[in-house]
Image (cartoon, rainbow, N blue to C red):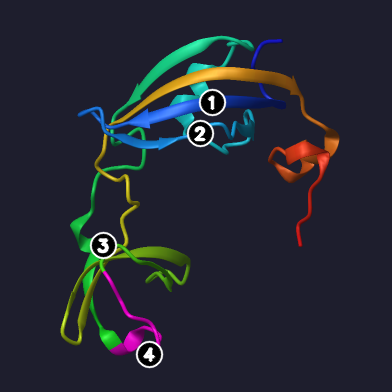
Amino acid sequence: MQISAKKVVTINYTLTDDAGNVIDKSDSDDFAYLHGAGNILPGLEDALTTKSSGDEVAVSLTAEEGYGSRDETKVQPVPRNMFPPDVDIQSGMQFRAQGSDGQPLLVTVANVEGDQVTVDGNHPLAGVNLNFQVKVVDVREATDEEVQHGHAHAGGEHDHG
């Protein structure tokens, strides 16, 4: 069966940067998504369209095609008292914050110096070219419920909690 809209696609992948450093990999846990629902990067989804189970594909996306260029205006100092007092703030920690538009935003702690914490609101992979090595493990028709919910359900079970 070929990959097209409203198909649940299971892949195994390795993601590297241009230097060959492994950023992420599915290991033994295959990754399932609903094709055409915007659940994965558009460039990766486009490259997988019309592929079939067993196919392997290498896909390279520029930073702009991935998570965008870095935006240094998203790197800002904030007072330490804006964080929970019982948490030992360390570089690399991630917190949910509210963006200037009121939308939820994930920020990464870039630096801690005294009472000042520098946070970075860029996606951790912003500014990074992405190289995917993908093997298509399975392709199946999506259930009506999966199409309605806009994502694949693992093992036929699903709970929106």
Q: Earlier in the sequence, mark 1 or mark 4?
A: 1
Q: Identify the residue under disc 3.
A: 74
The range drawn in magenta is: 81-90
Secondary structure under tag 1 reads: strand
Mark carried by residue 85? 4
Left or right: 140 in relation to 51: right
The quarter of the picture where the N terminus appears is top right
Check whether the beta carbons of the residues at disc 3 and disc 4 lie within 8 A of each other.
no
SS at badge 3 = helix
Q: Earlier in the sequence, mark 2 or mark 4?
A: 2
> Of marks 1 and 3, which one's residue comes earlier in the chain?
1
Q: Amino acid at mark 1?
A: Asn
Q: Main secondary structure of the magenta part?
A: loop
Residue under the point 35% across and 52% down: 123
Location of residue 5 in the rendering, given as x and y in whole percent from the top left corner: 67, 24
Badge 1 vs badge 2, beta-carbon distance below 8 Å: yes
